[in-house]
Image (tube, rainbow, N blue to C red):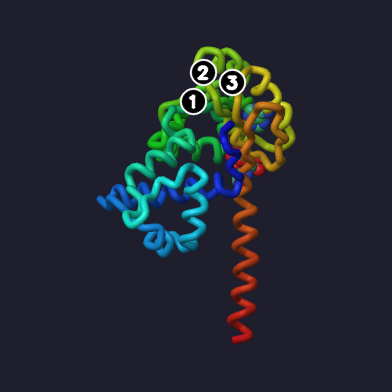
Amino acid sequence: MEKEISQAVIGRLPRYFRYLGELKDNGVQRISSQELSSLMKVTASQIRQDLNNFGGFGQQGYGYNVEYLYHEIGNILGLNVEHHLIIIGAGNLGQALANYLNFEKRGFLFKGIFDCNPALYGKKVRNLTVQPMEAVEGFILENQVDIAVLTIPKDSAVEVADMLVRNGIKAIWNFAHVDLNAPQGIQVENVHLSDSLMKLSYNLAKYSDASQKG
Ligand code: NAI
């Protein structure tokens, strides 16, 4: 049976992936856990522990092969396959996400964008055209969509998520201000940018306090 990896470790993998990607792009072929540690500002033992979950990838006295580790972590994160996404809610946030090109480099392809506001139907957002919600069902069937992005107000988020799941969506990237509970077999990632901002605000207050006290 495959070993269960903790969500804390999974949560750190994208950061490893990002740093290793940069090292790879800069022509670095191998790196020790100490070097990676000082670059990423996490302890070398944390890095070793995290990567040991997946068999380690490192060799005593050699360190990590950057390219290999980058690809392995990418595989673990499921980035070796393409994902098809649809965006529900073609407002500010939905359009901003659709316009962000870097998701495609990681294999996340936006296939459609939908809204319930007739004033937006037919509007071009990069390579997509805003379609009415009535078209979602048929679209999912025809395009093998696996991820839906919810950028709609919270009032309708639960109802829309249920409809998407009924139609075969397996994962929801939820930006609506409500924590969606994942039904059995469905993955949900609730994103709240304001949580991050509040953390920043806390640290700002703490830092200001400390500097005032000298
Ligand atoms: P917006 O008002 O520009 O866009 C929302 C769009 O959703 C509109 O075009 C509207 O017609 C559409 N919509 C509403 N109900 C719908 C439904 N049942 N089905 C399909 N489309 C529907 O708002 P914005 O700025 O794009 O934000 C979108 C949502 O994301 C808001 O609820 C906002 O509170 C939330 N938000 C969340 C953030 C986060 O970090 N989680 C950050 C920023 C916004």
- Residue farthest to the left? 27
Q: Residue at x 38, y 36 (%)?
A: 105
> From what the image shows, is residue 35 above or below residue 210?
above
Q: Residue at x 59, y 86 (%)?
A: 214
> From what the image shows, is residue 142 above or below residue 52?
above
Q: Residue at x 64, y 73 (%)?
A: 206
Q: Position of residue 61 (x, y in %)?
A: 33, 57
Q: Is residue 178 left or right of residue 19?
A: right
In terms of sequence position, does the residue under pointer 1 or pointer 2 come before the other? Answer: 1
Secondary structure of the residue carrying numbered label 2: loop
Viewer-proximal residue among 77 and 190: 77
Secondary structure of the residue carrying numbered label 1: strand
Disc 2 residue type (three-letter): Gln
Is the residue marked by circle 2 packed among few (<14), some (14-19), or many (20+) residues within 10 Å?
some
Disc 1 residue type (three-letter): His
Is the residue marked by circle 3 packed among few (<14), some (14-19), or many (20+) residues within 10 Å?
some
Q: CA distance from mark 1 to mark 2?
A: 7 Å
Image disc number at residue 84? 1
Residue at numbered disc 3: 132
In terms of sequence position, does the residue under pointer 1 or pointer 3 come before the other? Answer: 1
Q: Position of residue 202 (x, y in %)?
A: 65, 66
Q: Position of residue 169 (x, y in %)?
A: 60, 23
Q: Quadrant of residue 36?
A: bottom left
Q: Quadrant of residue 204?
A: bottom right
Q: CA distance from mark 2 to mark 3?
A: 18 Å
Q: Residue at x 44, y 59 (%)?
A: 40
Disc 3 residue type (three-letter): Pro
Residue at numbered disc 2: 144
Instruction: Say whether marks 1 and 2 touch (CB < 8 Å).
Output: yes
The N terminus lies in quadrant: top right
In terms of sequence position, does the residue under pointer 2 or pointer 3 come before the other? Answer: 3
